[in-house]
């Protein structure tokens, strides 16, 4: 998909670098490992990869705690390796999205270390959220906010003279102090960091915790019991503040300085698809993750309503939506859908893939889902909460979706590292020998071959993936049936529906229905009348349609 609005129908493959492929044999995945596996990714048929953070980091949260945003962590390789990877991806016509972490730095970032060293009154403290504690001796945190990982969102510092000092805010682990985005130095620094990677050839960014950058002035209390209930579902004084949008408008200007186009996708956990669409306004970001499939049950009615809501919310601002079934933070969907029956989980996961690939918009795949990997739930096997996974509490369970990929062979690490019997940072279940790339390749019944052929089909049929809407067909309860036609594609004018109102979005939809023809953003030369009927049967038994 050269040029144009390539992201609109793109299939983007998430690489959790630490667990993808380990070329140097230290048990941890690395950039060279990714580069050596490019033939695999090309064969799979994806359009782009998104790499989780590879910047210098103490790895308190798998690299989401960055101490130097301009350098590659030696754990993963070096700058030349990244440059070579970008080059090789581009040579194959694949694009690369880097992960950017603007909500917080590592506590090891020079800004934070120096702010601590300089003590109270240091102007450097204005870049973070240092606040005096409450209580007679400042021993009570400044407010009652809780970290997403559990426990207070504040940690007390020690002054240079050794006495207890101010507290600092961290919405995630104590190793991840939140930045104060009201400070001009923070804004300037990140625009410069974006340019650094765009100059190196990055095609875009995934913006970590995109909804968290701005905090409500005064940092008001919320009852902690309320916070758990409201997290990701409603307004909170530290998520979804309107002020974040101004930041992304300024980032968009930086992206638009580069040919490409270069894009950004927001990781924003918002209460509704309408809130998500705000990030997609024409002068903001190109994409935002649509997490609706992570939240919905395996229920045809529910799926249909989240599909409708997602498509229309994005269309209102002239954007296309995205689809996500799994990522490195959530339970793998083969297990989510299993309800205790792994085979049922796998069947549903395979059906969900076909559904996702048949819908308008961009699909994000998470490494290993193409192998049908289940969540590893036996945390004892996993060594009980490695800090590199974000550690403790409920989030420790994230390790279960981060187990290194099985590539080949009968012995751990199943080709993840170079040596049979060599290390892997998390142990892989024995049953994974049968799920390896090698074991599944060429077996037409395998999940891997299903992914390969489904992705090929999507490329073959311009009616799939492109466009902005679907046409529902009559079907029994429990079954979804819809029609995709190439006429549903975006308008031929190439500008797409850059509309700010519902009325104009509808006008553009009418233009599509009137046969304005296939346009940009899909696979180009659509055979006139290309049409695909898509059916999802959730009943567990065949039905006549
Ligand atoms: O996750 C952000 C995040 O907010 C989710 O972890 C959380 O589950 C959500 O708010 C729903 O409650 C991102 C990264 O994906 C994750 O790996 C990092 O640990 C986190 O940011 C901190 O950087």
Image (cartoon, helix red, strand yellow):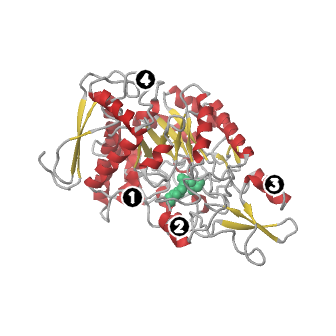
Q: Earlier in the sequence, mark 1 or mark 4?
A: 1
Q: Which mark is residue 227?
A: 2
Q: Would you name the residue on which mark 4 appears?
A: 494
Q: Is residue 281 above or below residue 116?
A: above
Q: CA distance from mark 4 to mark 3?
A: 49 Å
Mark 3 or mark 1, whichever is nearer to me: 3
Looking at the image, tell me whether mark 3 or mark 1 is earlier in sequence order: 3
Pointer 1 residue: 431
Mark 4 vs mark 3: which is more N-terminal?
3
Frontmost of labels 1 and 4 is: 4
- The residue that appears at 23% across and 25% down in the rendered structure is 529
Residue 32 location (% of width, % of height): 58, 39
Asked whether residue 522 is in view, the answer is yes
Q: CA distance from mark 3 to mark 1?
A: 49 Å
For the residues labelled 4 and 3, say whether their Cβ atoms are less than 8 Å apart.
no
Q: Can the viewer see residue 70 in this picture?
A: no
**Nearer the camera: disc 3 or disc 2:** 2
Q: Are marks 2 and 4 in contact (CB under 8 Å)?
A: no
Give the alpha-carbon distance from disc 1 to disc 4, as whole Å: 49 Å
Q: How far across and down, in percent of the image, does residue 313 sit? A: 40, 43
Q: Residue at x 84, y 56 (%)?
A: 122
Ligand 1 is found in the corner quadrant, namely bottom right
Q: Quadrant of the N terminus?
A: top left
In the picture, which quadrant includes the C terminus?
Answer: top left
Precedes in sequence: disc 2 or disc 1: 2
- Disc 1 is placed on an element classified as helix
Left or right, 226 with respect to 216, comes to left
Question: Label 4: how many residues lie within 10 Å, few (<14), some (14-19) or many (20+)?
Answer: few
Question: Can you identify the residue that label 3 sits on?
Answer: 114
258 vs 382: above or below? above
Find numbered disc 2 in the image and state the secondary structure of the residue it sits on. helix
């Amino acid at each position: 998909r050269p040029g144009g609005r390539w992201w609109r129908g793109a299939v983007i493959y998430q690489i959790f670098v630490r667990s993808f492929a380990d070329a140097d044999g230290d048990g941890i995945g690395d950039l060279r490992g990714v580069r050596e596996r490019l033939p695999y990714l090309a064969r799979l048929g994806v359009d782009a990869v998104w790499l989780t953070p590879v910047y210098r980091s103490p790895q308190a949260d798998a690299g989401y705690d960055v101490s130097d945003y301009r350098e590659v962590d030696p754990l993963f390789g070096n700058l030349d390796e990244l440059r070579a990877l970008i080059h090789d991806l581009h040579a194959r016509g694949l694009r690369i999205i880097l992960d950017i972490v603007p909500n917080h730095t590592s506590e090891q970032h020079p800004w934070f270390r120096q702010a601590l060293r300089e003590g109270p009154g240091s102007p450097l403290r204005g870049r973070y959220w240092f606040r005096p504690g409450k209580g007679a001796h400042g021993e009570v945190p400044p407010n009652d906010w809780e970290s997403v990982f559990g426990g207070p969102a504040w940690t007390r510092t020690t002054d240079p003279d050794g006495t207890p000092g101010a507290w600092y805010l961290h919405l995630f682990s104590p190793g991840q102090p939140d930045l104060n985005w009201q400070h001009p130095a923070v804004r300037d620094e990140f625009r410069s960091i974006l340019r650094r990677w765009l100059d190196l050839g990055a095609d875009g960014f995934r913006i970590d915790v995109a909804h968290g950058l701005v905090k409500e002035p005064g940092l008001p209390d919320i009852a902690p019991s309320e916070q758990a209930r409201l997290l990701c579902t409603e307004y909170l004084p530290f998520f979804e503040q309107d002020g974040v949008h101004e930041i992304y408008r300024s980032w968009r200007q930086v992206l638009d300085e580069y040919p490409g186009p270069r894009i950004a996708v927001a990781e924003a956990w918002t209460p509704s698809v309408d809130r998500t669409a705000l990030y997609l306004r024409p002068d903001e970001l190109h994409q935002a993750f649509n997490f609706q499939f992570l939240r919905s049950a395996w229920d045809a009615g529910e799926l249909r309503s989240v599909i409708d809501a997602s498509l229309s919310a994005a269309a209102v601002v002239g954007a296309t939506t995205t689809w996500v079934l799994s990522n490195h933070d959530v339970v793998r969907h083969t297990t989510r859908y299993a309800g205790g029956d792994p085979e049922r989980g796998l069947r549903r996961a395979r059906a969900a893939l076909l559904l996702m690939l048949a819908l308008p918009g961009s699909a994000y795949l998470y490494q290993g889902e193409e192998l049908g990997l289940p969540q590893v739930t036996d945390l004892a096997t996993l060594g009980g909460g490695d800090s590199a996974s974000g550690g403790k509490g409920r989030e420790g369970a994230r390790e279960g979706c981060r187990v290194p990929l099985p590539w080949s062979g009968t012995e751990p690490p199943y080709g993840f590292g170079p040596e049979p019997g060599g290390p892997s940072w998390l142990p892989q279940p024995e049953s994974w020998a049968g799920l390896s790339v090698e074991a599944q390749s060429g077996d037409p019944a395998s999940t891997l071959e299903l992914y390969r052929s489904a992705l090929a089909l999507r490329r073959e049929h311009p009616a799939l993936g492109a466009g902005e809407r679907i046409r529902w067909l009559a079907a029994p309860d429990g079954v979804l049936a819809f029609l995709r036609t190439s006429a549903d594609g975006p308008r031929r004018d190439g500008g797409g529906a850059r509309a700010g109102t519902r009325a104009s979005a509808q006008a553009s939809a009418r233009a599509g229905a009137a046969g304005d023809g296939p346009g940009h953003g899909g696979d180009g030369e659509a055979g006139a009348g290309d049409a695909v009927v898509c059916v999802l049967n959730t009943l567990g038994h065949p039905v006549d349609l």
